[in-house]
Image (spheres, rainbow, N blue to C red):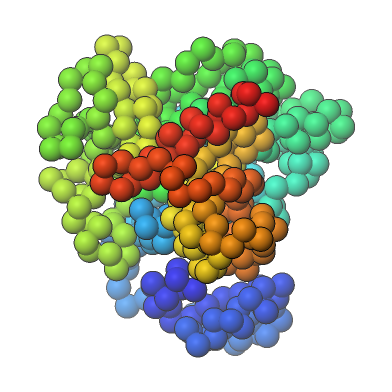
C-alpha cells in the first residue's frame, strides 16, 4: 500500500492470480486485469503516438528499495541511466546478442530489471520464468547459450542438485552469480567449475546499477581467499569521512559516486535526495577501504541492514510490526550469518507478558511483512540485557557478537 500510494498511480494492472490482492487497493487507482477482456480492449483501441518523444532524463522505471526508516523508497531510473548501465556492463562484462538472459528473479529487483534492459538493448533474448525453479533453470542452462546467469545466496545449492539430476552439460554461460560475499567460498568454486564460467564479485545497488564496484570476476574453480572489489567503468568514486573530506588510501570512508548510470533520485522524497546527493555526489551509506592497488575492500553498511537471499531487509520494518503488540516491551532485529540465505533476521524480544512466545510473534508477521523478512529466531531477554550506547541507542553489533558466543558454547 505504501509503495502504491507513494507514486499516485493513474492505473494498476494485475494478473488474474493477483485479483484478490488487487481488490485491496481499488481505492488507490482503477484496476485493469490482464486477460481476454484486456486484449479485446487493446485491439479495439486506436494506436497513437505520444505528443512528445521521451528525453534521456525521462523515467523508465521506479524500483523500490528499503529506506533507513524501513519504509521502501521509490528509486526513479531514467532512460539515460539504463543505457549507461548497459554500456558499463558491455565494457566490464561483455556479452553478445546470441547470449540470452534468464529472468527468474523478480522484475521488481534490479538484478533482473537491469539485465533485461541490457539484453534487449543489445538485441538478445530474455527468458522470463515464474520465479526460482531449480529444475526449470537447470533445463534452460543446458539448452540455451546464456550471458549472465543470476545465482543468489540460498539458490546455488538447490541449483547444483538440479543440475546433477538433469545430467546434461551446460550449453554455455559467460559469467554467473551475484553477492559473492554471502556465498560459501567452496560453493563458489563448485558452481564455477560446473558452469565453466567465472563468478561475479560485485557490489552495486538499485540506485547505481552494477556500479560502483562490479568489474571483478572470481576465476573458475578458485576458492577466493578475499573478495576485494574492482571499480566499475563509467563512474567516479571517492571515499569520504563524516565531514565529506576524502580519506587516504587504507582508511575507511563512505563511498560517494558520480555516474551517468545513477538513478535520478527518490520519488517524492526531496529531503532524502538533498542529503544523499550533497555536493554533486551520491552517498551510498556503505563504508569501504581503498587499497594501494586501487581495489576496494567492503567494511560495513553505515546504515544497518540485512541482506538475505538477494533482498535488503531493514530491521526497523520488522521491529515496528513486533512492537505493535502490547505484549512486546522492546524488539531489536539483527542479522545472523546463514549458509543458505547469506544472512537472516533474528529478533531479540523484551516481553511485557511472559506468556508471549515465538509462535505468537510469527503470527504478527504473517500478513504484515513479506515472508523472507520473518525473523528466523526469537530470543527473549530483559531490558537490561539490551546493550545501549550512552545516548540510548541499541548497539546491534554487540547483540550479534553475543549471539555468536551463545552458539559457540552450545
Please tell me which residue is depicted at 68% across the width and 85% down the height of the picture: 37
> Quick check: 190 above or below 100?
above
The quadrant of the rendering that contains the C terminus is top right
Q: Is residue 319 visible?
A: yes
> Quick check: 98 above or below 378?
above
- Foreground residue among 49 and 110: 110
Query: Can you give x and y, in whole percent of width and height, for residue 180 in the image?
Result: 53, 28
Q: Position of 368 compared to 285: left or right?
A: right
- Foreground residue among 258 and 247: 247
> Quick check: 235 above or below 375?
above
Query: Can you give x and y, in whole percent of width and height, for residue 170 in the image?
Result: 74, 28
- Foreground residue among 355 and 330: 355
Please tell me which residue is depicted at 13% across the width and 45% down the height of the picture: 279
Please tell me which residue is depicted at 76% across the width and 36% down the height of the picture: 158
Please tell me which residue is depicted at 34% across the width and 22% down the height of the picture: 296
Q: Position of 149 compared to 321: left or right?
A: right
Tally of marks: 0
Locate residue 395: give its quadrant: top left
Query: Can you give x and y, in whole percent of width and height, for residue 163 in the image?
Result: 80, 31
Q: Is residue 99 visible?
A: no
Query: Can you give x and y, in whole percent of width and height, for residue 39 in the image?
Result: 65, 80
- Foreground residue among 397 and 64: 397
Amino acid at each position: 500500500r505504501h509503495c502504491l500510494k507513494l507514486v499516485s498511480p493513474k492505473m494498476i494492472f494485475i494478473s488474474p492470480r493477483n485479483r484478490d490482492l488487487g481488490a485491496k487497493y481499488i481505492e488507490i487507482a482503477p484496476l485493469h486485469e490482464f486477460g481476454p477482456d484486456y486484449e479485446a480492449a487493446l485491439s479495439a483501441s486506436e494506436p497513437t503516438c505520444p505528443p512528445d518523444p521521451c528525453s534521456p532524463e525521462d523515467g523508465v522505471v521506479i524500483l523500490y528499495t528499503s529506506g533507513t526508516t524501513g519504509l521502501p523508497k521509490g528509486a526513479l531510473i531514467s532512460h539515460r541511466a539504463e543505457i549507461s548501465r548497459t554500456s558499463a556492463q558491455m565494457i566490464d562484462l561483455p556479452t553478445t546478442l546470441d547470449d540470452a538472459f534468464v529472468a527468474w528473479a523478480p522484475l521488481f529487483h534490479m538484478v533482473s530489471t537491469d539485465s533485461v534492459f541490457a539484453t534487449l538493448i543489445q538485441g538478445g533474448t530474455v527468458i522470463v520464468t515464474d520465479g526460482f525453479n531449480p529444475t526449470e533453470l537447470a533445463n534452460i542452462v543446458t539448452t540455451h547459450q546464456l550471458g549472465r546467469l543470476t545465482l543468489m545466496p540460498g539458490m546455488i545449492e538447490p541449483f547444483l542438485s538440479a543440475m546433477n539430476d538433469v545430467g546434461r552439460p551446460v550449453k554455455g554461460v559467460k559469467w554467473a552469480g551475484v553477492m559473492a560475499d554471502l556465498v560459501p567460498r567452496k560453493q563458489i568454486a563448485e558452481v564455477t567449475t560446473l558452469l565453466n564460467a567465472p563468478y561475479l564479485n560485485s557490489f552495486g545497488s538499485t540506485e547505481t546499477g552494477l556500479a560502483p564496484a562490479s568489474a571483478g570476476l572470481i576465476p573458475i574453480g578458485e576458492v577466493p581467499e578475499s573478495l576485494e572489489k574492482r571499480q566499475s567503468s563509467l563512474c567516479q568514486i571517492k571515499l569520504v569521512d563524516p565531514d565529506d573530506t576524502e580519506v587516504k588510501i587504507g582508511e575507511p570512508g563512505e563511498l560517494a559516486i558520480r555516474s551517468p548510470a545513477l538513478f535520478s533520485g527518490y520519488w517524492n522524497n526531496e529531503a532524502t535526495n538533498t542529503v544523499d546527493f550533497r555536493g554533486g555526489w551520491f552517498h551510498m551509506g556503505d563504508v569501504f577501504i581503498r587499497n594501494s592497488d586501487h581495489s576496494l575492500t567492503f567494511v560495513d553498511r553505515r546504515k544497518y541492514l540485512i541482506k538475505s537471499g538477494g533482498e535488503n531487509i531493514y530491521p526497523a520494518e520488522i521491529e515496528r510490526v513486533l512492537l505493535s503488540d502490547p505484549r512486546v516491551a522492546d524488539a531489536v532485529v539483527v542479522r545472523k550469518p546463514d549458509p543458505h540465505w547469506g544472512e537472516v533476521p533474528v529478533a531479540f524480544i523484551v516481553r511485557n507478558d511472559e506468556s508471549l512466545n515465538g509462535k505468537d510473534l510469527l503470527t504478527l508477521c504473517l500478513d504484515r511483512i513479506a515472508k523472507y523478512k520473518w525473523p528466523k529466531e526469537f530470543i527473549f531477554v530483559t531490558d537490561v540485557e539490551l546493550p545501549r550506547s550512552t545516548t540510548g541507542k541499541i548497539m546491534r553489533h554487540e547483540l550479534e557478537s553475543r549471539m555468536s558466543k551463545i552458539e559457540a558454547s552450545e
